[in-house]
Image (tube, grey):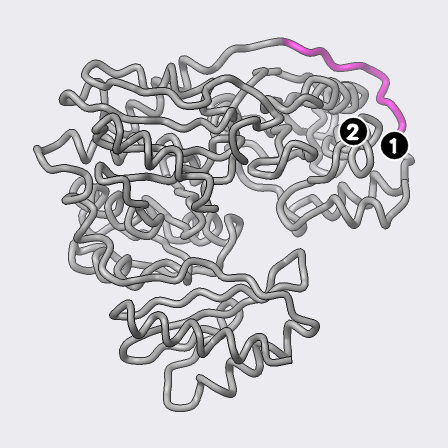
Amino acid sequence: MAMPQLEKIFKAYDIRGLVDTELNAEILQAVGASFVVALDIAATNGGPGAIVLGRDMRDSGIEYAQAFATGVNSQGVDVIDIGLASTDQLYFASGKFKLPGAMLTASHNPAAYNGIKLCLAGAKPVGQETGLAKIKELVAAGSIKPADITGSITNQDVLADYAKFLHELAGLNQVRPLTVVVDAGNGMAGHTAPIVLALPGLTVIEMYFELDGNFPNHEANPIDPTNLVQLQDKVIATKADLGLAFDGDADRCFLVDDTGALVTPSALTALIAKRFLVTNPGATIVHNLISSKAVPEIIAEHGGHAVRTRVGHSFIKQVMAERNAVFGGEHSGHFYFRDFWFADSGMLAALFAIAELSNGNQKFSELISSCARYPQSGEINSQVPDVKAAIDRVKRTFGPGNELDELDGITVTSQTWWLNVRASNTEPLVRLNVEADTAEILQQQVAAALAVIRDF
């Protein structure tokens, strides 16, 4: 197959592209066969001889899942098809069955896209350096021949087992009387939430639970605040205790408090960290470098050990495994759990928030206020002709007299603010994040940084 097309769809952590024009059934079939060969999954090579497969609600999902399964079967490997699933439900199946997994999804991307996320047994991620590059080479070569035997496909529903497992991890079987609004965005939370959130005491107000890969109400991308406005309005109108918003494959979760205010993923990271440190004194908790400085402060205040990582799930998962960290949070709304095979689960993060809210009589806005200490800019993207030159300008301008580190892009830390600039993996963009002690300092620093970045 043509390499330019493959270069476009093979990303750092998954395969993703426009349906039919960039990604099609033929490619998915080749990816299925190459997945088996590249990662020695066939029983004849000492592998498990089977994989688990799930898909989201996108229109092309059934065709693409069948094509992928055909490719896997062609190499003598069986497929356990769990059908419609959230990505973390697929991770659960991969962990439960101790098998490699594949999830047909384009996550939060618009309706025109589809893709596939791959993992090894126990939900270990497959990225460029752990098999994706080799899979791409095999697909490009197009030389894989069918095995002597053909694998089979069996269907297995794991939704109830997944829900039970999450309840056990969160220590939840009932709650005090609470009302939660859930915006599934027509994504896979519409499939999982009715089962996972069926807890005595919990009233769920549903928004957009109908599975629809065309996303008729709004994009299933809760990192964009415009997609949360309807949820905020609904929480206020119904006087709900909490609002939850999920992305298309429901592996990310964003929260709205009882006043309708957005809860930053950093604040939720800190809240969940505090809960873990009660049951795991002195534990290690991981956060990425664009998380609020409140996160390591709160972890230290509660006797934990905070470890800072680069942005990206493969880095977080690797560091968590190396340090045996109980929990990890990313500012993009991904939350990782040691006892969930170090994988991420937005639904499990939501259950931890509900459990914490159910513990006492505080409102969520009161509960979260101590975790949201500093104003933050959120991620601001700038398109520039030369990404490296833009980052160098920031380093020269803000570096002198301040603390500087280059773990991921450039992070400059002063007494009253910090900023991070880093390159996008996929586009000619510079990503800026700023946090400050006051809103006034934040505004000044964002303006100053953007002026430098965009001075070309």
Label 1 Cα crowd, 10 Å radius (few <14 / some 14-19 / many 20+): some
Question: Residue at the spot x=58%, y=81% of the render?
Answer: 392
Q: Is residue 207 left or right of residue 141?
A: left
**Above or below — where is 168 with respect to 247?**
above
Q: What kind of element bears circle 1? A: loop
Q: Is residue 447 magenta?
A: no
Q: Is residue 314 left or right of residue 328?
A: right
Identify the residue position indicated by label 1 in the image: 144
Q: Main secondary structure of the magenta part?
A: loop
- Outermost residue, bottom direction? 400
Instruction: Give, as a three-letter code, the residue at label 1.
Output: Ile
Q: Amino acid at mark 2?
A: Ala
Classify 400 as above or below 176.
Answer: below
Q: Mark 2 sits on what residue?
A: 33
Q: Quadrant of the C terminus?
A: bottom right
Nearer the N terminus, badge 2 or badge 1?
2
Which residue appears at 77% of the width and 48% of the height? 8
> Which residues lie in the magenta part?
145-154
Residue 380 locus on image (x, y percent) = 50, 61
Viewer-side residue, 79 vs 112? 112
Left or right, 255 with respect to 103, comes to: left
Q: Circle 2 sits in a helix, a strand or a loop, which is it?
A: helix
Q: Are marks 2 and 1 in contact (CB under 8 Å)?
A: yes
Residue 130 seen in the figure = yes
Front residue of 196/228: it is 228
Please indicate, yes or no, whether residue 102 appears anywhere in the rendered image.
no
